[in-house]
Amino acid sequence: MKKIKCLITAGPTREHFDPVRYISNPSSGKMGWFIAQASKEFGWDTTLVLGPSALPNIDGVNVERVVSAEDMLSVCRKHFDDCHILIMSAAVSDVRPKMFINHKAKKNEIDLNPQLERTPDILLTLSKEKGNKVLIGFAAETQNVLEYAKGKLEQKNLDAIVANNVGQASTGFASDDNKIDVILRTGEVIDFPQASKKELANSLIKFLSDRFFK
Ligand code: PMT
C-alpha cells in the first residue's frame, strides 16, 4: 500500500507593516498541530506548515515555520505537488498592509488610515492544480456556520470542509476543545461532538482515511 503524504497548515499568519507590528488573529495553531500529530501517528508521511506559534516541533513530522500568507503559500507550493491530501486549518489573514516600513516606525510615522490589500488565497490558488488530490478546508464562522462553510467548499473546489463555530470561548480559537462538523461535497454533514482538539484530530484523520483512501 502506498504511504499517504499529508500536508497540513496551522496557526495564524502575521502581516507586518513594520518589523514589530502586524495584522493577525488569535489562532494558537493547536488544531492543526494536533492534526499533524494524529496524521503522523496514523502512519502518514506528514508535513506541517506552521504560522507563528509557541508550539514545539513534532518528532517525525516535517515542520516548516512561516510568518506571512505569502510565505505560507510559497512553502505549501513546495510540498503540494507531492502530497495526496492537504488539510488547510491555518487561519490565514485575509488582508495585509500595502506599505512596509523596514524599521520600527515612530508614532508619528504610523498611517492611521493604512491602505490594505488582500493576501493570496492559498487554498483557492492550490485548488486550481487539484488533480486527484484530496483538499480539505476549514471554515471559521460566527454565524450561519454550515451555510457559509458550504459556500467555501464549493468556491474553493474542496472535497470536504470542516465547519468551525468560533463564536464561543470554549471552542475555536486558542481553546483546548473544539466542536466541528465535516461537510462533504454530497452535502452530507457529519457532526463531531465537542471534545479536546487532540481527540478531534484523531477522529478527523481516521474519518478522512476511511472516506478517501479505502
Ligand atoms: O489554531 P487554533 O487556536 O487551534 O484555532 C483553530 C482554528 C479556529 C483557527 C481552526 O479550527 C480553523 O477554523 N481554521 C480556519 C480558519 C480560517 O481562516 O477560516 P476561513 O473561513 O477564513 O478560511 C476558509 C479556508 O480558506 C481555510 O481553510 C483557510 O485556511 C483558507 N484560506 C483563507 C484565507 C486565505 N488567504 N487563504 C486560505 O487558504
Image (cartoon, grey):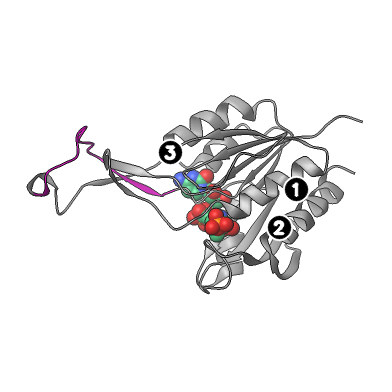
The correct choice, above or below, for 98 with respect to 143 in the image is above
For marks 2 and 3, the one nearer the N-term is 3
Quadrant in the picture for residue 124 = top right
**Picture residue at 70% right of the left edge, 60% below the top:** 183
The correct choice, above or below, for 71 with respect to 203 in the image is above
Q: Report how far apart the C-alphas of labels 1 and 3 lie in the structure.
A: 24 Å
**Picture residue at 69% right of the left edge, 35% below the top:** 61
Q: Which residues are magenta?
A: 93-107
Viewport quadrant of the N terminus: top right
For marks 1 and 2, the one nearer the N-term is 1
Mark 2 neighbour class, 10 Å CA radius: few under 14, some 14 to 19, many 20 or more: many
Q: Position of residue 189 (x, y in %)?
A: 74, 66
Q: Report how far apart the C-alphas of labels 1 and 2 lie in the structure.
A: 8 Å
Disc 3 marks which residue?
67
Q: Report how far apart the C-alphas of labels 2 and 3 lie in the structure.
A: 24 Å
Quadrant in the picture for residue 36 = top right
Viewport quadrant of the C terminus: top right
Q: Which mark is residue 38?
A: 1
Q: Is residue 139 visible?
A: no
Q: Amino acid at mark 2?
A: Lys
Of badges 2 and 3, the one in the foreground is 2
Disc 2 marks which residue?
198
